[in-house]
Image (cartoon, rainbow, N blue to C red):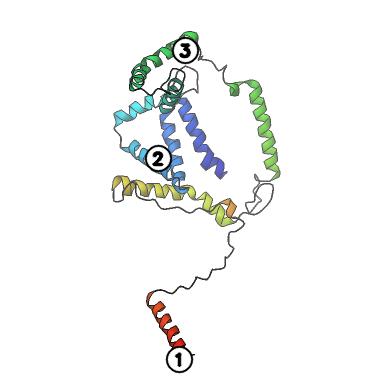
Amino acid sequence: YWVMRVLLEPCVNLLIAVRSGNYKARNASWSRMVPLFFAHNRRKYAKLGARNLADLQTMPQQLSHHLEKSFVVKRTDRPFSSIPVDQALECSINRLGKGRNGVSGKFSSQGIDRFCQTLLFRIMIYSVINDIVEIETNNNDGHIECQQNRLELDNRDLQVLVNKLDDEKIFHNDKKDLTELFSGKVIHAAIVNDICSTFDRGELELKKFIIERLVDRTVDIDAKMETMKTLKLIDNDTYGLTKPKLQKKVTVHGQDKLSLSASVVNHIDTGT
């Protein structure tokens, strides 16, 4: 349940929001993902997400309205076909820039300048040609997932998975301990509680990051972030086991080394 609710659901909702062009749903899904970046020490994504959430709260209303209408690109009237603007630009640059007549392989400054100056015009021509020959249609013929036989196969596979999980009795309330699937090994309660609280701990770290580094600016934004420790399922076999402490190697330094040398010399002189 935790994996489905905390990890997968925000990702699925973000995909739905982008595909349908729902700006508020996109922000809501993103705000549920950023605390997990802090909890699992994904520092680059954590900084990026925290800065983005802070900007969403402080940006002018006019800019917010503009982003609400232009954060995705929709080339046809076909439902669920929007893609982010940066993804559309990257696809266009890769398709047009790395193709046969692209900028790849051009080493002269004149050739690169000519390509950049005519890129916008060629993109417009490309869109017009698509509309003329109807390469991109407004129906769902190209979506394999929308076909009836695919829906039947997915329902059949889902029923097989549910029956298999039902044998593990994970949907019953009579189980007191969480166990691994197919093995029945009991997972330590401390590990379960630590994993299930990662979102809350990550959310606290996110708020602390925004207040200290973006609002009060008492800490530099590029300063090293603290590592958050989270128990994992792979720690179940070793959790609670006491490890023997290794004896520290005794080393002699400074004045102790001089005293030891003098003692050795005295023993040699006295013959003892």
In the picture provided, is 108 more to the left or to the right than 198? left
Instruction: In this rendered view, identify the residue nearer to me: 4 or 272.
Output: 272
Q: How many marks?
A: 3
Residue type at mark 3? Asn
Q: CA distance from mark 1 to mark 2?
A: 75 Å
| 88 up-or-down from 53: above or below | above
In the picture provided, is 22 more to the left or to the right than 235? left
Q: Which label sits on residue 270?
A: 1
Q: Residue at x 44, y 47 (%)?
A: 38
The residue to which callout 2 is attached is 49
Residue 175 place in picture, x, y as percent = 65, 51
Query: What element does badge 3 sit on?
Result: helix
Mark 3 or mark 2: whose residue is earlier in sequence: 2
Residue 264 place in picture, x, y as percent = 45, 83
The residue to which callout 3 is attached is 130
Query: What element does badge 2 sit on?
Result: helix
Q: CA distance from mark 3 to mark 1?
A: 103 Å
Q: CA distance from mark 3 to mark 2?
A: 36 Å
